[in-house]
Amino acid sequence: MKTSEKKIVCIVQARMSSSRLPEKMMKPLAGKPNLEQVFRQLSFSKKINEYILATSVDLTDDILFQWAKGFNIKCFRGSLDDVLDRFYQAAKNSKADILIRVTGDCPLIDPKIIDNVIDLHLINKFDYTSNVDPPTFPDGYDVEVFNFESLEKAWKNANLNSEREHVTPYIRNHKEIFNIGNYESDKNLEHIRLTLDNEEDYELISLIYEKLYDEKSYISLDKLLNFLSENSKVLDVNKHIQRNLGYTKSLELDKKLKNE
C-alpha cells in the first residue's frame, strides 16, 4: 500500500453514448485517446493503489472494454443508467476501503490535488471528502473521496433519479448522516471550464494538450494556470456553458416525476 493500510481505489466512470459530445472518450488529445490521457494523469498519484474503469454493458461501450484490456487496466461493466449501482458493484468487486471517483471527461485532472484530497480525508477521518462542495477548482478537476461504507449506505437508500444516475448526491444531500469535508483552492477558480462535454470544450482542451503535453510528466494545474495567465482569451470558447448540466437535468426529471 502506498500511504496507509487501507486499500485506495480510483474508479473512472466512462461511456461512449454521451449526447452532447458522442464518443468523447476516444477523442484524440496529443495523439492519444482522451481516456488514455485521463488514466495517464492519474498514474502520477502517490496515494492510489489501484485503478478501475467502470463502464456499461451497452454494446457501444465494447470499445472501452477492449481499450482497457489492451492497456491492462481493470474494467468493470454494469448498468448504463443506474451509475450508482455500477460504481458500487465495481467498488465491491475491488474490495476497496477508500474510493476515489473521477469521470472520464477530465483529461486535465491533477494527481497532486487528488492526493491532497485523500490526505484531508484520511487525516480527518471523514466519510466523504471532495473539492466540489462548494467548488473552488476549475470544472474538470472534480475529485471525490469516500469510504466504502458511505457508498454502500447511498446504494441502499438512494431512490431519486438524480441519486441513481449520479454516484454521490445522496451523500451530499444528507449531511446529517455523513461527516463531510471539502478541499478548497487558495483562489476561487470555479469559473474556469476545463471539462470535456461539448465540442467547444474539446477545442479548448485540444489546444492545451498541444501546448503543454509532455510525455515524461503530467499537466499540472499550476502549469496550466501559468499558460492561461498569458493566453486568457482561449477560455472564451466555452465560458458560456453551464457547469454540471447533466446533474441539473437529473434534478429537473426528479421534479417532473414527483409531480406526475
Image (tube, grey):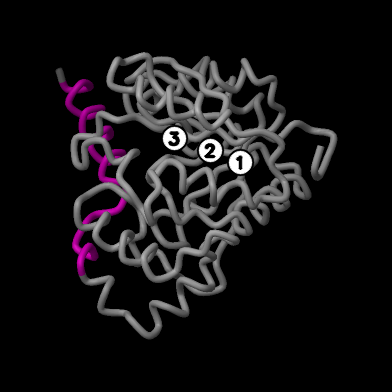
Verify CB contact (< 8 Å) between mark 2 and mark 1.
Answer: yes
> Can you see residue 134?
no
The residue beneath circle 1 is 145
The residue beneath circle 2 is 101
Q: Quadrant of residue 257?
A: top left
Few, some or many residues within 10 Å of mark 1 (<14, 14–19, 20+): many
> Can you see residue 62?
yes
Q: Quadrant of the C terminus?
A: top left
Residue at 81% x, 45% y: name it.
Answer: 3
Q: Is residue 34 left or right of residue 46?
A: left
Magenta-tinted stretch: 237-259
The residue beneath circle 3 is 169
Verify CB contact (< 8 Å) between mark 1 and mark 3.
Answer: no
In the image as oriented, which residue stretches furthest toward the bottom?
A: 230
Q: Quadrant of the N terminus?
A: top right
Q: Is residue 137 magenta?
A: no
- Three-letter amino acid code at the position of disc 2: Arg
Between 92 and 213, the residue placed more toward the observer is: 213
Residue at 37% x, 52% y: name it.
Answer: 31
- Three-letter amino acid code at the position of disc 3: Pro
Between 253 and 202, the residue placed more toward the observer is: 202
As measured in the structure, the alpha-carbon distance from the residue carrying label 1 to the one carrying label 3 is 13 Å
Q: Earlier in the sequence, mark 2 or mark 3?
A: 2
As measured in the structure, the alpha-carbon distance from the residue carrying label 2 to the one carrying label 3 is 13 Å
Few, some or many residues within 10 Å of mark 3 (<14, 14–19, 20+): some
- Three-letter amino acid code at the position of disc 1: Val
Q: Is residue 4 left or right of residue 156?
A: right
Few, some or many residues within 10 Å of mark 2 (<14, 14–19, 20+): many
Q: Earlier in the sequence, mark 1 or mark 3?
A: 1
